Image: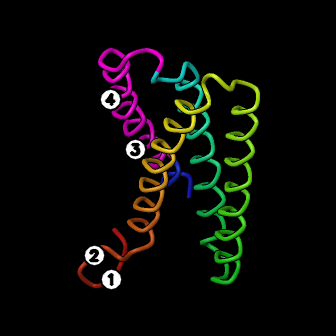
């Protein structure tokens, strides 16, 4: 489990560096009022939530299947409420930056959700010719 988690951490950091590089280029190309100053903090937030959710999913995957399903659904619901709470709170506290923040948050949400799903599918799918994981 530890080696799987470390491998995921490396992949996540590489993915985040690529997305961060794209965001940095976009900051120079797009006028300042269209990019939220909170964008670097959103990256840290998504890296943290991705690591935590992957850890709990890996831990539950080694147990009964029903336990994994329950954990998966619980993680999705908790993340949904946390994400909505953060967006609503930020929008009320910083009305001038609400739309750029929400756009950046949504784009990063899509990127990290696709990354998480593909990583977990790759991990759970048998990859060898006999169906054994490598």
Query: Residue at horizontal 75%, vertical 45%?
Result: 85
* Badge 4 or badge 1: first in the primary sequence: 4
Marks 2 and 1: CB-CB under 8 Å? yes
- Secondary structure at badge 4 equals helix
Residue 86 is drawn in which quadrant? top right
Task: Give the CA distance from mark 4 to mark 1.
Answer: 37 Å
- Secondary structure at badge 1 equals loop
* Label drawn at residue 128: 2
- Secondary structure at badge 3 equals helix
Task: Give the CA distance from mark 4 to mark 3.
Answer: 17 Å
Residue 48 is drawn in which quadrant? top right
Marks 4 and 2: CB-CB under 8 Å? no
The residue identified by callout 3 is 11
Query: Residue at horizontal 56%, vertical 31%?
Result: 101
Measured from the top left, where is residue 126 in percent x and y? 36, 77
Q: Which residues are magenta?
A: 6-33
């Amino acid at each position: 489990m530890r080696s799987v988690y470390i491998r995921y951490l490396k992949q996540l950091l590489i993915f985040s560096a690529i997305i961060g590089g794209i965001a940095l280029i976009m900051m120079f190309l797009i006028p300042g009022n269209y990019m939220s100053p909170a964008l670097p903090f959103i990256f840290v937030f998504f890296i943290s939530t991705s690591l935590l959710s992957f850890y709990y999913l890996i831990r539950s995957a080694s147990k009964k299947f029903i336990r994994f399903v329950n954990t998966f659904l619980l993680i999705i619901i908790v993340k949904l409420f946390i994400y909505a709470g953060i967006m609503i709170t930020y929008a009320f506290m910083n009305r001038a930056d609400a739309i750029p923040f929400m756009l950046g948050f949504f784009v990063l949400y899509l990127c990290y959700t696709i990354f998480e799903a593909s990583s977990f599918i790759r991990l759970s799918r048998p990859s060898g010719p006999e169906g054994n994981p490598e």
